Image (cartoon, rainbow, N blue to C red):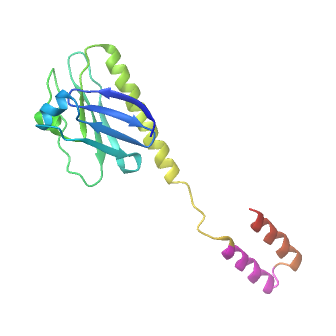
Amino acid sequence: MNLITQFKGQNGKILVYDDYIELSKDTFGGFISQGGYSGNRRYFYSDIVTIEYKKPTFIANGYFKIIIEGTTESNATVGLFASSSNSMKDQNTIILRAFTKKVGEETDSIFKLLMQKISEFKKSQNTPVNPISKMDELKKLGELKSLGIITEEEFQVEKQKLLNS
């Protein structure tokens, strides 16, 4: 998969790919907050309900929190210069620390990209699918012809349209 962007947070990093997001705790902060190496977690856009985001500022931490169905949520609390231990340990949360305005702008950009990816995926899943097969349509056309509703000529024209579609 193609890595689009990544951002290193206080307790790990977020990696954004074409089809999924990966949260890696393979950093010094991740190692400390998890009590050892805990591996990476991959979240496909299809599994993500939403992403909570709090923009980091010069004096207060922010976070990315991946929300998926079927998990128990911990309260992601961040504040001035510090974050709760629950937030630091949460496998679905990356704590963001901003010492410059540029960091907040970068995380805003990543958040917009993630929400766009999730939205695109959900739209592609909501495309109406025609459950009626060509065979079903042909059967209906045959019934209309046998009932005398359409002529043999109309039947042949519609049949060709259906077979060529």
Question: Measuring 39% from the left and 35% from the top, which residue is drawn there?
Answer: 16
Answer above or below: position of 37 versus 99.
below
Bounds of the magenta span? 135-149
Does residue 64 appear left or right of residue 143 in this picture? left
Question: Measuring 42% from the left and 37% from the top, which residue is drawn there?
Answer: 17
Which secondary structure dominates the residues rendered in magenta? helix
- Which quadrant would residue 32 be assigned to in this image? top left
Confirm whether the magenta stretch covers residue 141.
yes
- Which quadrant would residue 43 be assigned to in this image? top left
Answer above or below: position of 114 versus 145.
above
- Name the outermost residue toward the top: 100
User: Picture coordinates of residue 25 (x, y %)?
Assistant: 22, 35
Does residue 9 appear left or right of residue 82 in this picture? right
Q: Is residue 147 visible?
A: no
User: Picture coordinates of residue 108 (x, y %)?
Assistant: 37, 26
- Which quadrant would residue 102 be assigned to in this image? top left
Quarter of the figure with the N terminus = top left
- Name the outermost residue toward the right: 153
User: Picture coordinates of residue 112 (x, y %)?
Assistant: 42, 31
Depth check: give the residue in front, 73 or 47. 47
Does residue 41 appear left or right of residue 122 in this picture? left
